[in-house]
Image (cartoon, rainbow, N blue to C red):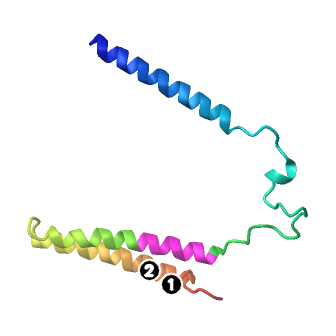
Amino acid sequence: MNMLYLTGGILIFIVTIIMSISSLLSKKSNVDREKSSPFECGFDPFNKARIPFSLRFFLIAVIFLIFDVEIALLIPMMLTLKSAGIMSWTLTSTLFIVILLVGLYHEWNQGALEWSN
């Protein structure tokens, strides 16, 4: 047991020494303002580096993810048909699909599915 502790201690010591040496060697000695800026060509940018994000694209992506998760919940429903009663399975799946259709109709009615106005 003592040999295990000794080996573990030696390994931790070696790893600590290697990490300390690599940390000391990787540091830069001088920090230049121009080198640390995103543009190294010497002039300030005229425009912002980032373009504005389309909120319509984001909303459609979120709606897609929601309905994609719902499809992933519908697929295992076919496997539960054997273990569940036919009436409870039919009622549950019908209610689930109706909720999905009502949500889809609401999104369509609100105009969230139209890409351009």
The number of numbered badges drawn on the structure is 2
Tell me where the magenta segment starts and ends, as one range. Answer: 56-67
Helix, strand or loop under label 1? helix
Q: Is residue 92 visible?
A: no
- In the image shown, does 102 or 59 lie closer to the viewer? 59
Side of 101 relative to 86 (left or right): right
* Residue ID for mark 2: 104
Occupied quadrant, residue 87: bottom left
Side of 19 relative to 98 (left or right): right
Q: In the rendered view of the protein, which quadrant contains the N terminus?
A: top left
* Residue ID for mark 1: 108
Helix, strand or loop under label 2? helix
Side of 55 relative to 96 (left or right): right
Q: Is residue 88 above or below residue 105?
A: above
Q: Are marks 2 and 1 in contact (CB under 8 Å)?
A: yes
Q: Residue furthest right?
A: 43
Find out whether residue 69 is within the magenta segment. Answer: no
Instruction: Residue 3 in the image: state x and y as whole percent.
Output: 30, 14
